[in-house]
C-alpha cells in the first residue's frame, strides 16, 4: 500500500497516481533517490572529515615543530641582544682601561740632573715616580751629593711608579800610594801627608843603607787604597853612623861641661872682686 504524501490517501502498491488527488508517485522515488544520493554524499563528506581528522592527528608532531619555531626565534633574538649588550660592555671597559693605561704611561720624566739627591727625590715623588740611588766616586767637590746622571732622559714618557736610577757623586776616598823608597824619612812623611795617607814608621838596623833612609814600604807604589788604610815604611838605622854620632854627642857633652865649669869659675872670681 502506498500512502499519498500529498493527501494521505491509501493507494495500491502498483499505483502510479493517487486515486484521490492524482499525485504522481514516481516523483517520490526520484526524491528518494536524490535523498539517497545526498545521504551518500553526506556519508562521503563524513568519511573525508574523519580521514582528515586522522591525518591531523598523525601530523600533530609536525605542527608542534612549527609551533616551536616562534619560540626558537625569540630565544635567538634574546641571545643576539645579550651578545650585543655584552660587546658594548666590553668596549666600554676596554676604553676605560685604555684611557687609564694611557694616563699611567703618559707621565713625563722630569730632568733632575744638577739637583741634590734630596731635591731630586722630592721632584720625582711629585711626579708619582719611584727612584733608587747609584753612587759613583768623584774627586770633584762640586759633584759630591749631586745627581750626575739619570736612567731615563728628562722629557721622556713613562708609566706611573717607574723606577728612575739617580747616579750621585760621592767623595773618592781612594788614594794612589807614592813611591817613597830611598827617600829620607822627612821627605817620605811629607809626601804621605800631602796624599792624606796614614803611615807607621819602623826602624831596621843595617850597615849597608844610609842612615834615616826609607828602605821598604808595606804597600807597593801605584796601588789605590782608601785614605783610612795605614802604610808601614821601614827606615834604615845604620849602626856605624850611630856610633859616630854617639861619639860626637859625648864630645859635645864634655865640651859643654867644660864650658860650664869655666863660666862658673869666672863668676866666682867676679864675686870675690866685688867683695874686696
Image (cartoon, helix red, strand yellow):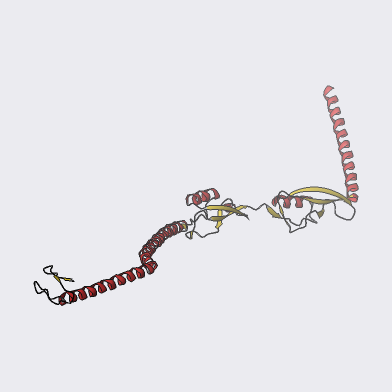
Q: Nearer the viewer, residue 33 or 4?
A: 4
Q: Of all residues shown, which one is farthest toward the top? A: 275
Q: Residue at x 36, y 70 (%)?
A: 55
Indicate the position of residue 39 as horizontal and vertical percent values: 25, 72
Relative side of 46 to 272, left or right:
left
- In the figure, 101 relative to 45: above or below? above
| Relative vertical location of residue 73 with respect to residue 122 in this rendering, above or below | below
Left-right relation of 77 to 229: left
Compare residues 263 and 255 and report the one nearer the observer: 255
Residue sitting at x 54%, y 48%: 118
Q: How many marks?
A: 0
* In this picture, residue 61 sits left or right of residue 159: left
219 versus 67 height, above or below: above
Q: Residue furthest left?
A: 21
Q: In front: 181, or 38?
A: 38
In the image as oriented, which residue stretches furthest toward the front? Answer: 12
Locate residue 2 relative to residue 121 in the image: left or right.
Answer: left
In the picture, which quadrant includes the C terminus?
top right
Residue 144: percent from left, percent from top: 59, 51
Looking at the picture, tell me which residue is in the foreground, 264 or 183.
183
The quadrant of the picture occupied by the N terminus is bottom left
Location of residue 91 by image quarter: bottom left
The picture places residue 261, in percent across and down from the top left corner, at: 88, 33
- Rendering coords of residue 53 (x, y %): 33, 68
Q: Residue at x 86, y 50 (%)?
A: 204
Amino acid at each position: 500500500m502506498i500512502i499519498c504524501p500529498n493527501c494521505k490517501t491509501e493507494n495500491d502498491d502498483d499505483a502510479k497516481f493517487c486515486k484521490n488527488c492524482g499525485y504522481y508517485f514516481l516523483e517520490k522515488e526520484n526524491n528518494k533517490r536524490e535523498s539517497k544520493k545526498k545521504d551518500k554524499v553526506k556519508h562521503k563528506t563524513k568519511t573525508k572529515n574523519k580521514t582528515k581528522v586522522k591525518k591531523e592527528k598523525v601530523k600533530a608532531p609536525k605542527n608542534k615543530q612549527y609551533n616551536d619555531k616562534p619560540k626558537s626565534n625569540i630565544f635567538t633574538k634574546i641571545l643576539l641582544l645579550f651578545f650585543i649588550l655584552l660587546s658594548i660592555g666590553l668596549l666600554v671597559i676596554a676604553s676605560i682601561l685604555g684611557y687609564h693605561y694611557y694616563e699611567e704611561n703618559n707621565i713625563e720624566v722630569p730632568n733632575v740632573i744638577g739637583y741634590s739627591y734630596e731635591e731630586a727625590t722630592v721632584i720625582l715623588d711629585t711626579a708619582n715616580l719611584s727612584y733608587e740611588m747609584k753612587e759613583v766616586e768623584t774627586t770633584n767637590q762640586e759633584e759630591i751629593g749631586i745627581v750626575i746622571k739619570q736612567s731615563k732622559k728628562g722629557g721622556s714618557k713613562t708609566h706611573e711608579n717607574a723606577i728612575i736610577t739617580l747616579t750621585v757623586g760621592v767623595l773618592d776616598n781612594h788614594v794612589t800610594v807614592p813611591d817613597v823608597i830611598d827617600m829620607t824619612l822627612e821627605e817620605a812623611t811629607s809626601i804621605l801627608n800631602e796624599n792624606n795617607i796614614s803611615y807607621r814608621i819602623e826602624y831596621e838596623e843595617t850597615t849597608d843603607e844610609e842612615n834615616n833612609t826609607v828602605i821598604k814600604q808595606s804597600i807597593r807604589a801605584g796601588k789605590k787604597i782608601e785614605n783610612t788604610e795605614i802604610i808601614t815604611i821601614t827606615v834604615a838605622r845604620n849602626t856605624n853612623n850611630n856610633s859616630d854620632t854617639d861619639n860626637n854627642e859625648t864630645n859635645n857633652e864634655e865640651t859643654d861641661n867644660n864650658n860650664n865649669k869655666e863660666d862658673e869659675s869666672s863668676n866666682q872670681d867676679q864675686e870675690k872682686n866685688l867683695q874686696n
